[in-house]
Amino acid sequence: MRGDSYSVPMTTSATELQTWVPTLTFAAKLALVRHQMQWNMKEAALACGLPPQSWRGWELQRRLPHDIRTVARRIHERTGVSREWLLEDPSEIDGVPMVRYAEVNRPASRSASRPPDNRPSARPSANPTNGLRRTVRLPRPGTGQGA
């Protein structure tokens, strides 16, 4: 509505202001880099050799890349932005890290990262039918006989 005015209290005294630091998530950092380079999302992704849909998900949906280290390296190589800054976790306060991106995305040992694989092996075994499927011919409808 035009003509309506709103009163917003403002402070000008430095003693009343609280110190704050903006939280720069990985998504926010991607947006900053992209704006600095004057790219749209697709241009940024292609320039860095990354899938545009992935970049879009990282920036807009705040998802983290599966291999954030490789993504950070590619962005660094193309733009010159610090890899360490890209990987820096916003939850680090006063030098105490909460959880770092790189630690979350670090590949664990095979035994810890995957459940046991109970599928039949592709290697030959003593039982030649192990893991193979048998084809069964079903009668044709209405004839009572196989094909």
Image (cartoon, helix red, strand yellow):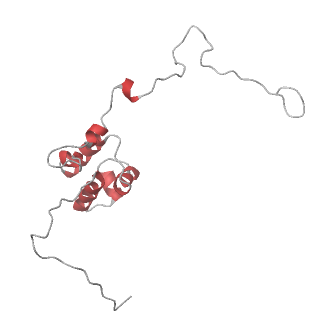
Q: Nearer the viewer, residue 118 or 8?
A: 8
Q: Is residue 77 visible?
A: no
Specify the farthest residue to the bottom.
Answer: 3
Q: Which quadrant is the N terminus positioned in?
A: bottom left
Q: Outermost residue, top direction?
A: 126
User: Which residue is drawn at the image coordinates 33% and 30% (left, top)?
Assistant: 108
Where, by quadrant of the figure, is residue 131 drawn?
Answer: top right
Against 62, residue 35 (above or below) is below
Label count reads 0
What residue lies at 48% left-to-right and 23% top-to-bottom?
117
Q: In the picture shown, does residue 113 fall above or below 56? A: above
Residue 109 visible in the snapshot: yes
Measured from the top left, where is residue 18 in percent x and y? 15, 65
Residue 7: x and y in percent read: 26, 84
Q: Position of residue 145 (x, y in %)?
A: 87, 26
Residue at point 37%, 26% (across, down)? 112
